[in-house]
Amino acid sequence: MKRALITGVTGQDGAYLAKFLLEKGYEVYGTYRRLSSPNFWRLQYLGIFDKVNLIPVDLSDTSSIFEAIKTSEPDEIYHLAAQSFVGASFEQPIATGDISGLAVTRILEVVRQVNPEIKFYQASTSELYGNSREEGILNEETPFRPASPYAAAKLYGYWTTRIYRDAYGIFAVNGILFNHESPLRGLEFVTRKISNAVAKIALGLEKELRLGNLEAKRDWGYAPEYVECMWLMLQQDEPDDYVIATGEAHSIRKFCETAFDIVGLDWQEYVSVDKRFMRPLDVKYLCGDYSKAKNKLGWEPRTKFKKLVEIMVKEDLNRWERWLNGENFPWDAPNYPSEVKILTRTLRT
Ligand code: NAP
Ligand code: G4F
C-alpha cells in the first residue's frame, strides 16, 4: 500500500486530495497546525476524518517536519499548506514569506537528507504570472511577474522545487494551478464570499454584499478535479511542471450576476464596492492554457463556470436552510466573526 503525506490536509485541496487518495487505496497522513480550537470541518464534511492519520506540524520548525516525515515514511509528499490568501499577504508579508515560501526548502531539505526517493508535489499557482498579460492565455513558458507578497513567496517555492529536481535528482514537480473553488472554499475568497452572501440574502438573513475590485478576471475551475492532477503529476516517468486551468476567464462582476440569477435576484440591487476589500496591487487577468496537462496527463476540466457557480450557491443555500431547521453539521460559518453575528441573532426552529 502506498503512503502519502499531505501538508495542509485541513484546507480545501488537502481535504479533497485526502479523499481522492484514500479511494485509490493509499494510507494517508496529513499535517495540521495546532490551534486552540481544532479545525477539521472539511474532513468531517467529506466523511474521512477518522481515515486520515493526523500529525501536528509547525512549518517554521524543521525538526517538526523531520518528525512528520519519519513517522509517515511517505512515498509521496503533497505540499499544500500555505498562507494562501493573497489579500492577507499584504498585511502579513513576512509570515507569508516564511510559511508559503521558505517552508518549501525546509521540507525538501528533509527529503534530501532522509530519503531522496520521496516524490514531491509543490502547490504552485497562477498568481506567479501576476500582471504579466492582460489578455491571451498563460502557459508553462509565460514569464512570471508576481504582484503580491504571496506570489513572491510562491515564486521562491517554485524555483526551490526546480532547483532540488535539477541539483539532486529529486522527483519534484510544480502544479501551476489556476483558481479552483468548491463548497469547501474558505469564506474569505471571493467566490465563496459571493455564494454564501447570495444564500443569506435569498433567505432574508442579509441585505447586502460588499466587495472590492469587480473588474478582475479569473479562470475558475472545480477543486475536486484539480486534486486529481496533483496525483497524476507524481505518477509520470519524469518530473515536470504543468498548468492546470479551464481556459476561460470571467470577471467578479459576472460571477455576481450568475450567482444572484440562480436565486432569481438582480445582483445590482445588493452588491456595492467597498474600498476595504481593494488590494494595494491586484492581478487583473488570469486565464490558463492546460494543453500540456491534456496531452501528457490526459486531464481536462469537466466542470465549467456556470455549473461551478450553481454548485456553490446551492450548497450554501442548503447549509443555511439546514441551520434554520435546527440541524448541526460540519460547517465553517461558526469560525467567522461576520457569520457568528448572524448565527447568534437568528432564531432556529
Ligand atoms: P486553504 O484552503 O487556505 O488551505 C491552506 C492549508 O494550509 C490549510 O490546511 C491551513 O491550515 C494551512 N496553513 C495555513 N497557514 C498555515 C501555517 N501558518 N502553518 C501551517 N499550516 C498553515 O488553501 P487551498 O485552496 O486548499 O490551497 C492549497 C494550496 O494550493 C495552497 O498552498 C495554495 O497557496 C495553493 N493554491 C491554491 C489555489 C486555489 O485556487 N485554491 C490555486 C493555486 C495554488 P488551517 O486549516 O489551520 O487554516
Ligand atoms: O478569491 P480571491 O481572494 O483569490 P485570488 O487572489 O485570485 O487567489 C486565489 O487564487 C490563487 C490562484 O490564482 C491562489 F494561488 C491563491 O492561494 C488563492 O486561492 O480574489 C480573486 C479576485 C481578486 O482580484 C480580488 O481583488 O477577486 C477580487 N475581489 C473583489 N472583491 C475580492 C473581493 N477578493 C476577495 N477575497 N474578497 C472581496 O471582497
Image: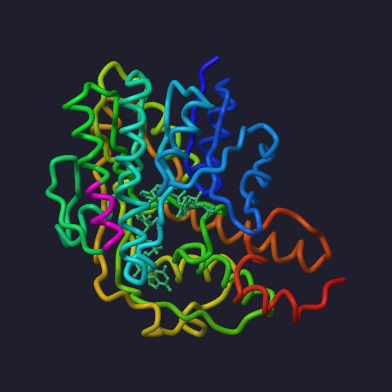
Snapshot quadrant of residue 62: top left
Q: Main secondary structure of the magenta part?
A: helix
Q: Nearer the viewer, residue 327 or 202?
A: 327
Residue drawn at x 44%, y 84% is 272
* Position in image of residue 327 (x %, y %): 81, 60
Q: Does residue 347 appear left or right of residue 318 in this picture? A: right
Against 153, residue 284 (above or below) is: below
Q: Nearer the viewer, residue 320 or 328?
A: 328
Q: Does residue 174 appear left or right of residue 203 in this picture? A: left
Q: Does residue 169 appear left or right of residue 194 in this picture? A: left
Number of numbered discs present? 0
Against 24, residue 309 (above or below) is: below
Q: Is residue 175 magenta?
A: no
Snapshot quadrant of residue 265: bottom right
Q: Nearer the viewer, residue 214 or 153?
A: 153
Q: Quadrant of the C terminus?
A: bottom right
Q: From this viewpoint, which residue is outermost toward the front?
A: 63
Q: Does residue 57 appear left or right of residue 173 in this picture? A: right
Residue drawn at x 38%, y 26% is 232
Q: Nearer the viewer, residue 80 or 167?
A: 167
Q: Is residue 153 magenta?
A: yes
* Position in image of residue 215 (x %, y %): 30, 72
Q: Quadrant of the N terminus?
A: top right
Snapshot quadrant of residue 322: bottom right
Stretch in magenta: 149-156
Residue drawn at x 60%, y 84% is 207
Is residue 304 visible in this depiction of the protein?
no
- Figure quarter occupied by ligand 2: bottom left
Is residue 339 visible in this depiction of the protein?
yes
* Position in image of residue 120 (x %, y %): 35, 30
* Position in image of residue 69 (x %, y %): 46, 29
